[in-house]
């Protein structure tokens, strides 16, 4: 074969490859435009792309507009595999910007309700533990058809500021003028691993998550690591105007939450374990909720949890058991207003002897120290706890808000001035039958103190 023929053959093959690539490119875009985007009333408003000789589709600009948000994608590289059943191998996005145009969460809820109406509804006959195991199994089967990476994510939520929300932020450190500031983060999914991080405009991480699976594996499994800042996460959810019952909405407007949550969740076959750490936790209401008066719940918790769904490991036949372990360092402290407590008790037809007892022995602080093992049986609705220490005391000559400034983790074992004698109650081998609380005309729960 002479040189001109070789040259012509190379040109023909190159043109054929480019034509095939262009056809594949157009086919992909048309498919997305006519099917997936139509489901969300979306339309493409800008598009600039080209196909390289190694069959990599590079999109320098892609703009998608929906009734809920504007999506702007810059420098997206798509690796194609035309010889396999899965056409897309990887998607690498340098920049993804989402600008909210309307309330997103109510729209998603309405869409979910609409799909449920169209689907055939069947009453669930599964127990609570069976429903939990089914949800874990679905999560263990989660998989993406291709790898994807978003190096820079910017999200601007649609914000509706009304009087109630403005009042909520008066008692917080949030600057109302900055409520529309962006969130930033990144997202990667590589094989059986998924990782994401979301930060506010001050580069404070409000949520980080890492999901992974061991593959191949004989049993369903996954591992999930979570960390969150409660105050930042609360503001994030609050900005999305999530529809909640009136009572819960009033509660979120009255309280402020702080603390750092770290959680490690492992699921292997029929065994679920959780390690949860809540540090520097506080739940504070300066004006109280309805007639409660000001109060603050604070402390630190470190809880190890295990649920074994296997019938061979069940202590009680046909009943799944939730097991928790509390290290001795756990402490929760509730500080409150004594006059408001007395008023609440007086207005709820409680025995006058109880009100008189509290008047004669004033207290404005409870500290709870759970220790040892906690078990809850799902079917029997019964819980047990190894040990619980309850400490009650009164901080004399303290205004409600000044009494709300101590940390129980720091105050344990310390002698403090202006404090009345401490009242302490130690409970061991506690058994509480919750089923008796919800069964009409039944005896009250049994509390055994051995």
Image: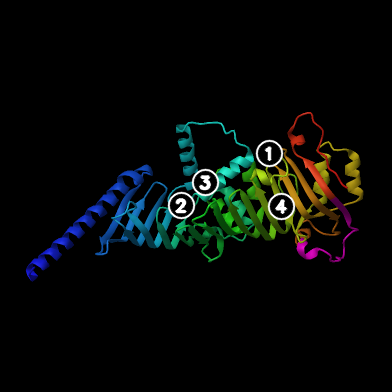
Q: Residue at x 85, y 44 (%)?
A: 448
Q: Which mark is residue 318?
A: 1
Q: Residue at x 77, y 35 (%)?
A: 436
Q: Which residue position is annotated with label 2?
A: 143
Q: Where, quadrant-wise, is the N terminus in this rendering?
A: bottom left
Q: Which mark is residue 324?
A: 4
Residue 358 in the image, given as x and y percentages of width and height: 88, 47
Disc 3: CA contacts within 10 A as few (<14), some (14-19) or many (>=20): few
Q: Which residue position is annotated with label 3?
A: 138
Q: Residue at x 91, y 58 (%)?
A: 421
Contact, CB < 8 Å: mark 2 with mark 3?
no
Q: In the picture provided, is 92 more to the left or to the right than 261?
A: left
Give the number of the mark in front: 1 or 4.
1
Going from N to C along the chain, the mark reached first, 1 or 4, is: 1
Quadrant assignment, res 330: bottom right
Going from N to C along the chain, the mark reached first, 2 or 1, is: 2
Nearest to the observer: residue 245 or residue 269: 269
Position of 151 relative to 321 (above/below): below
Q: CA distance from mark 1 to mark 4?
A: 20 Å
Q: What residue range appears in magenta?
A: 408-427
Give the number of the mark in front: 1 or 3.
1
Q: CA distance from mark 4 to mark 2?
A: 30 Å
Q: Residue at x 34, y 43 (%)?
A: 38
Q: CA distance from mark 2 to mark 1?
A: 32 Å
Nearest to the observer: residue 308 or residue 205: 308
Going from N to C along the chain, the mark reached first, 1 or 3, is: 3
Going from N to C along the chain, the mark reached first, 2 or 3, is: 3
Contact, CB < 8 Å: mark 1 with mark 4?
no
Contact, CB < 8 Å: mark 1 with mark 3?
no
């Amino acid at each position: 074969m002479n040189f001109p023929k070789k040259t012509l053959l190379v040109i023909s093959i190159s043109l054929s490859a480019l034509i095939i690539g262009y056809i594949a490119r157009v086919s992909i875009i048309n498919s997305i435009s006519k099917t997936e985007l139509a489901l969300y009333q979306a339309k493409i408003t800008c598009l600039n792309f080209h196909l390289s000789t190694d069959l990599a589709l590079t999109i320098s600009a892609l703009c998608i507009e929906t009734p809920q948000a504007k999506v702007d994608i810059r420098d997206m590289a798509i690796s194609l595999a035309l010889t396999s059943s899965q056409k897309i191998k990887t998607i690498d996005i340098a920049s993804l910007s989402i600008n909210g145009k309307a309330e997103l969460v109510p729209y998603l809820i309405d869409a979910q309700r609409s799909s449920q109406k169209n689907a055939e509804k069947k009453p669930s006959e599964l127990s609570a533990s069976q429903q939990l195991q089914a949800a874990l199994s679905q999560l263990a089967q989660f998989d993406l058809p291709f790898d994807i990476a978003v190096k820079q994510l910017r999200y601007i939520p649609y914000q509706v500021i009304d009087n109630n929300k403005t009042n909520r932020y008066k008692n917080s450190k949030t600057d109302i003028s900055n409520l529309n500031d962006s969130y930033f983060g990144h997202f990667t999914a590589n094989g059986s691993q998924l990782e994401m991080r979301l930060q506010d405009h001050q580069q404070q991480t409000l949520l980080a998550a890492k999901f992974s699976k061991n593959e191949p594996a004989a049993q369903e499994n996954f591992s999930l690591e979570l960390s969150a800042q409660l105050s930042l996460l609360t503001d994030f959810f609050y900005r999305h105007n999530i529809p909640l019952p009136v009572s819960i909405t009033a509660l979120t407007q009255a309280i402020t939450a702080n603390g750092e949550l770290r959680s490690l969740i492992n699921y292997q076959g029929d065994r679920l374990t959780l390690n949860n750490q809540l540090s520097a936790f506080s739940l504070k209401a300066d004006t109280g909720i309805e007639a409660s008066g000001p109060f603050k719940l604070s402390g630190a918790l470190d809880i190890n949890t295990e649920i074994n769904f296997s019938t061979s490991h069940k202590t009680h036949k046909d009943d799944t058991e939730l097991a928790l372990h509390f290290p001795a360092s756990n402490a929760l402290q509730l500080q409150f207003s004594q006059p408001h407590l007395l008023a609440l008790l007086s207005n709820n037809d409680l025995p006058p002897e109880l009100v008189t007892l509290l008047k004669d022995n004033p207290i404005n602080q409870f500290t709870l120290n759970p220790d040892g093992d906690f078990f809850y049986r799902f079917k029997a609705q019964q819980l047990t706890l190894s040990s619980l220490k309850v400490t009650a005391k009164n901080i004399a000559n303290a205004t409600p808000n000044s009494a709300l400034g101590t940390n129980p983790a720091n105050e344990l074992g310390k002698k403090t001035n202006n404090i009345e004698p401490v009242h302490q109650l130690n409970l061991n081998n506690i058994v509480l039958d919750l089923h008796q609380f919800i069964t009409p005309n039944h005896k009250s729960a049994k509390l055994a103190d051995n």
